[in-house]
Amino acid sequence: MAQTSLKIRLQGLECHFTWKLNYSRSKLQSLGETMIDISSREGVQCSWTGYLYNFLAYLHHALGSTEDTLQCLKKAEEAIRQNNPDDVELRLVVLYGNLAWVHYHQGELTESQTYVEKVGRLLRDNPSPCSGVVWGERAWTLNTFDVSKKKEALYCFWMALKEDPENKVLRCGYAMAFNKSVDRKDITPKLRSEMLEHLRIAKELDPEDLYITVMYLQRLAESGQVEEARKLANEVIEKTLDIYVSHDSSIDLARRTLERHPNSRQLKRHLGKCYKWKIFSLEEERNPMRHILIENAVNLYEEVVTLYPTSLAAKLDLSAMYKESGRVDRADKIFEDLLLKREGMEPQDLQRFYNWYAQHLFYAKQDASRSIDFHKKAAEIMLPTDQRDSSIHVLLSIVHNRGGRAEEIVDFLDGLDGEGQYFIQ
């Protein structure tokens, strides 16, 4: 097969290389860190491990590491074969597509052609099942690693379930995607009940999937069913830390587990989150010993930033801890450094940075004018996120209170969509 003809056939494959996952290098690195953390968790079982390694292989390829790419593809195949002993070849259709592309990029055209032909045979002999597999793996990829495409992920799961309605991996994936597709502010009692029901069914289908279990118990706690959530938490508490029932119990669990695994960067990051939740809780605001907790959080987040050097979230959390501890100058330095690097940020990260910086300027620096400037920058990024809603809310509050630059803000908000939707009421 001529190289040009092979390239055309490769472009027709359904796999990570053709799904237009066009992330920046910083985003690829961040995704890679997330998946490495997931794959290294002790005792965590899930039926989509093969999907995880398959996508991690693509990330390693995009970052230029051929050895890690092939190693992850090998792990992906092992996991898929273990989880799908009855129809394993069908489940490998996306992985074979990835292998075809990897060999092509290495100049191994014969090997690439072999995998292209394998995919072709599978599609000819099993068109409907293969379609379901492709929809499912694409859905899982979007659901787990691209929050801006959560609606598309939900649609992909729905299409996959049309082809394979009894597949427990797809049912569990749909439950996770459905829960992630709804913004917290839009959750009604009826919708919360529906979300819980999807998760309950998914948990019954795959009781060993800790991600489903954790998501289910968190929704139970949010809905007021705290005792049932606590009971469920006790069943899995030694297997995972991604559980929240109360601030103190979460901190205590994280500390005890970190004593057993002192070198785990995941545990340190999780303990930092627990500190943050407690520090900013209403009951903690009146605690005379709050400064001790803040100092512990500062020390921990300084280490977390060194362990996750590309993590925007870790740096922003550290800036918040610095502010709470009175070290505003150190928080300033973090924002100044990020400001210099903003050109390489993904739109969602940039929006988040602008929103946080705007709040920092207002509350820590008492610079209302520059704060408005950065809230406007966050609002200009047309992604439907909590950060954008927060910035628009601040700008609207300034207008309603007839604050400084109110007329300018009115013109700005009217110009966002050209219809003046923020002032129709």
Image (spheres, rainbow, N blue to C red):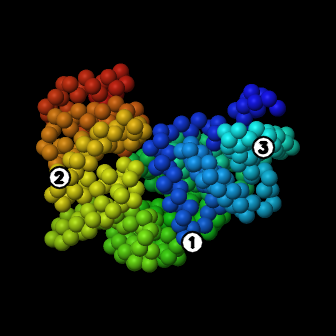
Q: Residue at x 35, y 43 (%)?
A: 352
Q: Position of residue 322 (x, y in %)?
A: 22, 57
Q: Secondary structure at mark 1?
A: loop
Q: Position of residue 213 (x, y in %)?
A: 54, 66
Q: CA distance from mark 1 to mark 3?
A: 36 Å
Q: Residues within 10 Å of mark 1 (few under 14, many from 20)?
A: few
Q: CA distance from mark 3 to mark 2?
A: 57 Å
Mark closest to the chain's N terminus, 2 or 1? 1
Q: Secondary structure at mark 2?
A: helix
Quadrant in the picture for residue 7: top right
Mark closest to the chain's N terminus, 1 or 3? 1
The residue carrying mark 3 is: 111
Under mark 2, the amino acid is Val
User: Can residue 202 be seen?
Assistant: yes
Work out whether 291 lies above or below 71: below
Mark closest to the chain's N terminus, 3 or 2? 3
Name the residue at the front extreme. Answer: 107
User: Can residue 157 be seen?
Assistant: no
Q: CA distance from mark 2 to mark 1?
A: 41 Å
**Quadrant containing the C terminus in the rendered view:** top left
Q: Residue at x 38, y 53 (%)?
A: 309
Work out whether 357 lies above or below 315: above
Mark number displayed over residue 173: none
The residue carrying mark 2 is: 328
Q: Residue at x 64, y 36 (%)?
A: 18
The residue carrying mark 1 is: 43
Q: Secondary structure at mark 3?
A: helix
